[in-house]
Amino acid sequence: MNIAIILSGGIGSRMGLDTPKQYVLVKREPIINYCLRTFLANKNIHAIVIVVADKWKKFVKENVKKLRSTKPIYYAQPGETRQYSIFNALIEIKEKKFSYDDIVIVHDAARPLCSDDLINRCLEGCRNADGVMPVIPIKDTTYFSEDGTHIQSLLNRNYLWAGQAPEAFIFGKYLKAHEDMPREELIKVNGSTEIAYKAGLNCKMIPGDSMNFKITSPEDLSNFKSIINKR
């Protein structure tokens, strides 16, 4: 089976809004609904775990009802970091007695334009890998600087890739990577695939989607609104 983890526990502090970005209404729907609808409609997704703070749980549940899905939907508490939120969701999946051979696919509620095709390609990639991450090539000339004011080296962009979500993993192996990593290391993890790579899992890259951007700034939100309003 394939279980989606939707991360919706962030507060979106960089947006400067009172409401977390994933709950901002666009065409009378919260942003989280746009990716939820895609995952719920995907024929290869069998269940969903939504990571959401208690303050917003009722709001999310009310909006999930409007999507009228018959798939099982579970809820997990956010952790102190993004990766700990994922860990909490993995524990919830374990408690629901899913098989260690199942696949988990991790996505951000703030990436509302994830496509059905990208979800399917991530899941398909786990047929011959422990983990799958969609990536897009770096287009700009990229420099390395420790202090942010002086160039120390020029990086070859031909070998640089920007990771996206969703990222898919063999559930049992991904859970063990979290259980085995000391807290002081786990708390420093930034990307979903980072911990899998550090655990020695076979992680595969697949082509991502430039439309699958994450809303992190007012400009991103404006761009998303423009896309939706044109549909």
Image: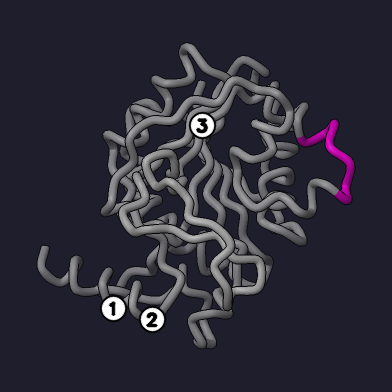
Tags 1 and 2 touching, CB below 8 Å:
yes
205 or 61: nearer the viewer: 205
The disc placed on residue 222 is 1
Q: Is residue 101 magenta?
A: no
Give the CA distance from mark 1 to mark 2: 6 Å
Instruction: Give the amino acid at mark 3.
Output: Ala
Could you tell me which residue is drawn at 48 percent across and 19 percent down?
126
The answer to whether residue 17 is visible is yes
Q: Which mark is residue 168?
A: 3
Q: Position of residue 133 (x, y in %)?
A: 47, 35
Count residues near mark 3 (Cα–Cα under 10 Å), then give few for <14, some for 14-19, many for 20+.
many
Q: Is residue 139 left or right of residue 164?
A: left
Q: Nearer the viewer, residue 120 or 160?
A: 160
Q: Residue at x 51, y 21 (%)?
A: 1
Specify the amino acid type for callout 2.
Pro
Direction top: furthest residue: 128
| Screen quadrant of the C terminus | bottom left
Callout 1: few (<14), some (14-19), or many (20+) C-alpha neighbours within 10 Å?
few
**Residue designated by label 2:** 218
Q: Which residues are magenta?
A: 178-184
Magenta segment main secondary structure: helix
Does 100 appear above or below 52?
above
Residues under labels 3 and 1: Cα distance? Answer: 29 Å
Residue name at image x 48 percent, y 55 percent: 154
Query: Which numbered circle lies on residue 66?
Result: none
Residue 214 drawn at (x, y percent): 41, 61
